[in-house]
Image: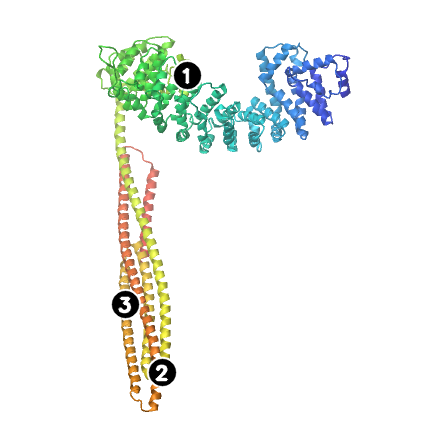
Amino acid sequence: MTMNFFRGVMGGQPAGPQPTGAETIHKLCDRVASSTLLEDRRDAVRALKSLSKALSKQSGVGPVSILLNHLIISPPFLHTLIRKERLGKKYRLEVGTQAMDHLVHILQTDRSDSEILGYALDTLYNIICNDEEEEQDESEDMAAAPPIPVSGKHKNVPVSDENAQKQEEDLGVLFTDKFLGDSENVTLLLTLLEEFDFHVRWPGVKLLTALLKNQCNQVQGVILVSPMGVSRLMDLLADSREVIRNDGLLLLQQLTKGNAAIQKIVAFENAFERLLDIITEEGSSDGGIVVEDCLLLLVNLLKNNSSNQNFFKEGSYIQRMKPWFEVGDDNSGWSAQKVTNLHLMLQLVRVMVSPVNSPGATSSCQKSMYQCGLLQQLCTILMATGVPADILTETINTVSEVIRGSQINQDYFASVNAPSNPPRPAIVVLLMSMVNERQPFVLRCAVLYCFQCFLYKNQKGQGEIVATLLPSTIDANSISAGQLLCGGLFSADSLSNWCAAVALAHALQDNLTQKEQLLRVQLATSLGKPPVSLLQQCTNILSQGSKVQTRVGLLMLLCTWISNCPIAVTHFLHNQENVPFLTGQISENLGEDERLVQGLCALLLGICIYYNDNSLENYTKEKLKQLIEKRIGKENFVEKLGFVTKHELYSRAAQKPQPVFPSPEQMLFDHEFTKLVKELEGVITKAVHKTSEEEKKEEEVKKTLEQHDSIVIQYKDLIRDQDTQIQELREQVSTLSLNSEQMQNQITQQQSQIQQHKDQYNILKLKLGKDSQGLSSSHGEGAHVNGLHSEELSQLREEVEELRRQHTLQHTQLSDKDSLINTLRCGAAAAAQTAEGGAGGSDNTELLGEVESLRSRVQAQCAEISQLQTERLELIRRAEAVSSAPASSSESSADTVTVSELESRLAAQTTEAERLKEECRGLREGHAGLEQQLASAQSTVAIEQTEKTKLQQEVQESKKEQDDLLMLLADQDQKILNLKQRLRDLGETIDEDEDEIDARDQFGEDDDDDDDEEEDEENND
């Protein structure tokens, strides 16, 4: 079959009719499926790739490369084949229908050959994607080539360009559905993306991108459940080949559209770090289209995704955005790509602080942007020269949302000055642009949005704006925001009127003080005439019949001004012309353009009824309702009131705070005003339909409720005060507990010191025992040497033994002292718990008595030691007398020998006496040290006694305070029960479960008191 095919293709002249494109594709598919040689399959897939895609005029001939490099082709058939290739899009249906399954099989089986994989992926991409550029090239080729016959329903069917485009898109979706019929095909494609070979990875990225464009949700679902599916795609950003990395960015853009789960996975795959690194490498705002792709992907990841926004903020990525907005002094010659990049960067900032985000997340991002200097950088662009108009407009919108609702950011913006001479606040410069009709419409809308955001929840800023209108603060030498707003409010440009009215209404939003202050503003309308109030001037312009846009703006300002402000309502009704004008406007049957004005007039009149304090006799609530019923009719009034919410532009303005309008004529409603209408429409309708009796009943019920509320508030204040007192008492108890712990720590430290003293005392006792033993042995030897003084030595030995016994007795007494100290410590602990310290005092008295007895015994021992020393001196003197007696008789030799012996004995006795003297001195020093230790122990005992006394006093005070606290709690419980009884008497229902809980709490407290009393009794026992 193959030889017949080549024989038919390569002959000099065809024997019969030439094969159609469908037949050729069928033969190539058979070759892909049946050929055993890899080269044959590869060439067949290459031919299918060429037939599936139109070639440009500079391209080579695709099917000619099907193993024909070594063969000769007839020129006529070669020309026909080239024409078929250039019109290859006509074969897209045939290739997709017949070859898709074979191409998928190639992807599954021929994984070892990257070239055939690349051809197969390119072919699949050609039949799935809808590329406008390729179709444009195709249309040029079709215009240059004669028509050829094609098979199927497309044969010789002329279609328009739009229909052809739609058919191509439908065809791409059709083949995408066929490819996605088996979800394993997407998994196979994800596996192929792990191949590093360029000819496999790049067409794989393009094919997956085309699939996402045609069937985004289905492909996202498969990738989401595929193991490591998103991680494989994130690896594309780390590819060193820029072509693959850039196409990977396009793939991730399609992947992250509208899927929060995939957005989170991509973000936690370190996408923010990688994308910001790429933006920095490519030159930030001066970079090319790669920066644009990165910014688009960042917007996809962060928009309406609070988790990713928090991750972006916590990762300190907001700080990395600041260098993007650093512009130089020379801002001329901005390229289109730079404008696009900076526009997307500003959009990214707005995504982080969008009003649709949660208030907490928005506030946190606003704070970070101020702290890192991003807001300051944006304000620098705002005041710079040479910035393109669209970038300036988007910067104003971005600054608006960065400061919206953030007090610190609003204060900083109020301090920004424009680089003019003299310097002017940025707010004044922006308002000058807003009321200037020569400025672009989108720029004026952006300035209005910035002013609204500056005043949003900013009572300080509202006061500053209104203050510029007050007579006492007007400076004739400078232009203020109030002057610009008044100038715009009364100018000939209706758009300036509307913008100034809305801006001034935002200065009064939810601020009763400024509504009352604005009533003081006086305007000089012309020379020679007295000044009129701003409120009166607004109504005068309203009655003059100006443009619809101007009247709508003034009516919105008046409704905002007098709502929830009875004083302003009184001022408005004081002008006798206002009510007739409103009733006349409402009762007339005007055209479609005037319906909105009629609805707003009905709203204004309804506000005058609802917030009327009946201070004007001619315009009380009842009289105004009677006037409506007579001149307008209640049903007609309610119908006209509904014109406001039924207007087609009302719902558009209610969607988001930013004023976005396609044209100045459609700029009619303000976002905050739509909230006011929604709030007041229902209550005004009810107020109009209520009768006087219902009004009286409602007033009575309201007064009763106010009285009840005042009583409840009083009780709440009382309970709050009691709670505060209880909290203070609890803090005092905590302080006392802390002091008790500190005292316990001090007792522990003192115990350790006493233990150290005991150890030192034991050491001294051992030393004293050794000294006594040495003294006893010395006395025994002296008795053997000197027989003359045996009785004195025996007496001395007995005295030393007596001294040893006294030392033993002293040791026993010190042990008793230690036991008494331990008893004192236990008594102190027991006193801390039971607040009874009688036993500890008696123990302390006994301890002091024992110490005094011990001191007297030590003094007696010192006296005995002195007596022993005296006896020793007497013994030495007697020995000297004996030695002098033989020296006087030198007559006989026997006496001489006796004298010599006596001298030797005397010398020995003298030496022994000196040694005994030294030992007695050491013994005396030991006694002195022992006495010092006893004095130290006595001082320690005294300190312990003092600390114990203090602790007992604090325990008594704590117990007294606890008793007082219990009395206060009991009084509070009784008061709460009385309050509940009074509420029951007043008809209020009290939940019985709360009574049961209170009873259980009371019983629980009684049980706790009983337990405490039992513990006290056990401690006393």
Foreground label between 3 and 2? 2
Mark 1, secondary structure of its residue:
helix
Q: Residue at x 58, y 33 (%)?
A: 227
Disc with the residue nearer the chain's start (2 vs 1): 1
Percent of width and height locating residue 662: 43, 14
In primary-sequence order, the first of circles 1 and 3 is 1
Q: Secondary structure at mark 2?
A: helix
Kind of residue at badge 3: Arg
| Residue 1010 percent location from the top left of the image | 32, 50
Disc 2 marks which residue? 904
Tag 3 secondary structure: helix
**Residue that carries the numbered disc 3 in the rendered image:** 855
Q: Height in image: 245 above or below 820? A: above
Give the spatial CA distance, label 3 vs label 2. 43 Å
384 or 448: nearer the viewer: 384
Q: Write down the residue under mark 1.
A: 442
Q: Position of residue 165 (x, y in %)?
A: 58, 14
Measured Cα–Cα span from mark 2 to mark 1: 133 Å
Residue 97 visible in the picture:
no
As displayed, is residue 648 above or below residue 366? above
**Mark 1 Cα-neighbour bin, 10 Å: few <14, some 14–19, many ≥20:** many
Q: Position of residue 1015 (x, y in %)?
A: 33, 54
Q: Nearer the viewer, residue 390 or 736?
A: 390
Going by the numbered disc 1, the residue's amino acid type is Val
Report the front residue among 441 and 865.
Answer: 865
